[in-house]
Image (cartoon, rainbow, N blue to C red):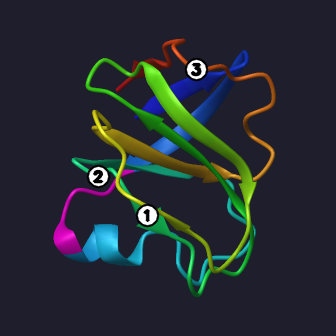
Amino acid sequence: MYIYMEKEKIEIDVYSSFIQKAIGLIGKKNIKKGIVLPHCNSIHTFFMKENIDIVMTDRHYKVLYYYKNLKKNKMILPKKKVYYTFELPKNTIKNLRKNTYLKAED
């Protein structure tokens, strides 16, 4: 899967199993591609090796929340209406705004 973020094509892996979601990007260094967690409305960054960007969308990829350069050992509590949570390499989102739509392709 790919998403387009500010004219940049970003490769995204889909993590849908419980174990994949629980581990996410924990322990990864030099993150080059992102992940998407379907049916996920909260995350944590405990045990992360580096900061990441987070984008939370509804089923239609409408941006509801985003967090730039989220530091290690933080928690994002459950958010209403969130369906997809994207964990992206740091500094991926620069001019992203709420209520815009991400363009995604398989």
Q: Nearer the N terminus, badge 3 or badge 2? A: 2
| Callout in the foreground (3, 2) | 3
Please provide percent x and percent y for residue 39. 21, 47
Amino acid type at circle 1 is: Ile
Please provide percent x and percent y for residue 66. 60, 38
Q: Residues within 10 Å of mark 2 (few under 14, many from 20)?
A: some
At numbered mark 1, what does the secondary structure look like: helix, strand or loop? strand
In the rendered image, the vertical position of residue 99 relative to residue 73, given as above or below: above
Residue to which mark 2 is pinned = 40
Give the residues drawn in magenta, as a range: 14-18
C-alpha span from label 2 to label 1: 8 Å
In the rendered image, the vertical position of residue 90 relative to residue 5, given as above or below: below
Residue 43's disc number = 1
Kindly indicate whether the residue at mark 1 contacts the one at mark 2 (C-beta within 8 angstroms): yes
Left or right of 47 in this view: 41: left
Q: Nearer the viewer, residue 58 or 4?
A: 58
Residue to which mark 3 is pinned = 98
Residue drawn at x 73%, y 34% as measured from the top left: 93
Amino acid type at circle 3 is: Lys
- Is residue 17 inside the magenta stretch? yes
